[in-house]
Amino acid sequence: MKTDESSNTSNPFRDREPLEDSLAVKCLTEGEIDVLGRMPWSSNATFLVDISLDEKIIQGVYKPLSGERPLHDFPPEIYKREVAAWELAKQLNWGMIPPTVSRLGPLGEGSLQLYVPCDYEQHYFTLRDKASYSKTLKKLAVFDIVSNNTDRKAGHVLEGKDGNIWAIDNALSFHHQFKIRTVIWDWAGEFIDSQLIEDLQGFISSGPSESLVSLLTPMEIDALVTRAQAVCSAGSLPYDSTGYRVPWPLL
């Protein structure tokens, strides 16, 4: 029977087996990049890519500096902040941020993040009432305060097909001025788990990693440590007393 190839247009997004972070970083750093196409919904140029290393092929999300739109409140090279979010999450051992590296790609220097297979119908507003995700989402709320995320939309919170919560699109973070804008206010006023406080205290004691320091300005690094100290001192998540500290659109 003849098949209609035009109706068999394949979904470019592929599932994969879970990857160890070390292997993912090796593939992202050393693999050959093949651009599959531009991803929708993004204000800056964002591309779905295949990454091949030896006989392994994974997918990634490539955000080149050349595709960034100028912003009045953030300097150029916001792709480095995508990498900084991964470096911070790695140092805290909190997960949630897909492995992300800075490297040269087909369109120049940019960030390259491991693609997360997921159901795009799911987002923060559909996930927040699931008891199994409550602890991770609360941890993400803490992470966003510390990293000063100014653009945590609901659609930036993914339910991976691996059963984990993943936070993507972290480029608008780490400003030295407090600019938090997030949809995750559900745990405002609640105490932060003692393990998270302990992790942050360890981060403060050891200081940001060399990799993290290399991605941000000295003023931003100082502000990052100050926010971590403030969170530890407060011991609870803040309220949005203004009602305006949310991104737009929300999704």
Image (cartoon, rainbow, N blue to C red):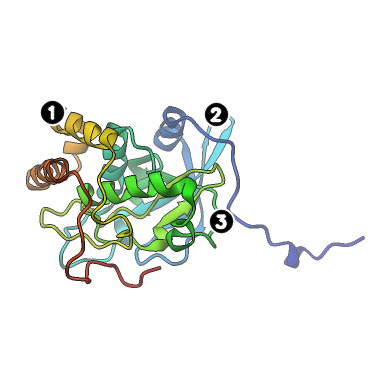
Between disc 3 and disc 2, the foreground one is 3
Could you say which quadrant of the image residue 199 lies in? top left
- Residue holding disc 3: 119
- Of residue 166 and residue 80, the one placed in the foreground of this image is 166
Residue 39, horizontal then vertical, whole percent: 47, 61
The mark nearer the N terminus, 1 or 3, is 3
| Quadrant in which the N terminus is drawn | bottom right
Label 2, secondary structure: give it. Answer: loop
- Quick check: marks 1 and 3 in contact, CB under 8 Å? no
Rendered position, 244 above or below 67: below
Q: Residues within 10 Å of mark 1 (few under 14, many from 20)?
A: few
Between disc 1 and disc 3, the foreground one is 1
Is residue 125 shown left or right of residue 189?
right
Residue 52, horizontal then vertical, whole percent: 53, 37
- Of residue 231 and residue 250, the one placed in the foreground of this image is 231
Please name the residue shown 27% across and 46% down the image.
143
- Residue holding disc 2: 54
Type of amino acid at the residue the image marks with label 3:
Asp
Q: Tell me if I can see residue 113 in this picture.
A: yes
Is residue 74 shown left or right of residue 44?
left
The mark nearer the N terminus, 3 or 2, is 2
